[in-house]
Image (spheres, grey):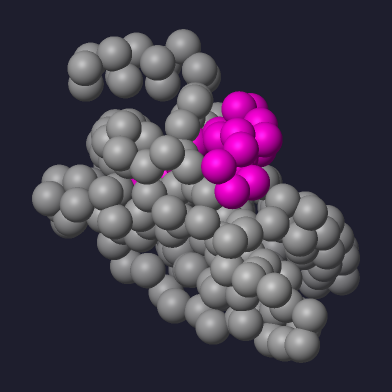
Amino acid sequence: MDNDKHLKGTTTVGIVCTDGVVLATEKRATMGNFIASKTAKKIYQIDDLIGMTTAGSVGDAQQLVRLISVEAQLYKMRRQEPMTIKGITTLLSNILSGQRYYPFMVQLLIGGIDKNGPAIYSLDALGGNIEETQAVATGSGSPIAYGVLEDRYHDNMTVDEGVDLAIRALHNAMKRDSASGNDIDVVKITRQGYEKISSEDVNKKREALN
């Protein structure tokens, strides 16, 4: 059985900025050549200032979101402080590596801001994790997205600049990758909170790129 097909139908982007992080995805879900959904949710809030993007099996991703959200809430109740992004990533990594024979078919980005500042980690299906210090993309459209990210990312980028860059990267990926498409979801996370950018604002920014 070729499980790899679960991992191919999406593009997600994460950008580390001076004052927070940006997470963004397109909203097309595919099964082979079939477009199964045009409004698929691929960014989940898992704590007050932490989000997760998902590529791969939707069912597996939703199960992991439920698991990790509960663990984050329990930790906060016990310790009176939120889990760090690294702590959540390590816990997820352990869950994924413990399922080696029946793996969760997902590729994840965990990002947000905590007492150590802004951070993003990428995780593969077997629990390998990497801290991303600048910009990262996952999924089938990631080669195109990376071209834009590497060309335009710069040090000291603000979250507002990061939002513009994430939209530009996804907009270009969606033009070239048939498994990525439809609308774009963008979230910016700063000390002030977890904020989803409105569809109207995203579409205005996309129109300016055409």
Q: Residue 191: in sight, yes or no? A: no
Residue 12 lies, in percent from the top left, at 46, 49
Q: Is residue 53 above or below residue 29?
A: below
Q: Is residue 186 magenta?
A: no
Q: Is residue 21 magenta?
A: yes
Task: Say which quarter of the image contains residue 107.
Answer: bottom right
Q: Main secondary structure of the magenta part?
A: strand
Residue pictured at 77% horizontal, 87% vertical: 101
Q: Nearer the viewer, residue 34 or 135?
A: 34
Task: Say which quarter of the image contains residue 65.
Answer: bottom right
Q: Residue 123: in sight, yes or no? A: yes
Residue pictured at 79% horizontal, 54% vertical: 59
Residue at the farthest left position? 151
Residue 85 lies, in percent from the top left, at 57, 67
Residue pictured at 44% horizontal, 63% vertical: 119
Residue 34 lies, in percent from the top left, at 61, 38
Residue 92 lies, in percent from the top left, at 69, 74
Which stretch appears magenta?
16-41
Q: Does residue 33 appear left or right of residue 93 in this picture? A: left
Residue pictured at 37% horizontal, 42% vertical: 177
Q: Quadrant of the C terminus?
A: top left
Q: Quadrant of the N terminus?
A: bottom right
Looking at the image, how many numbered discs can be counted on the residues? 0
Q: Is residue 46 above or below residue 188?
A: below
Q: Does residue 210 appear left or right of residue 55 in this picture? A: left
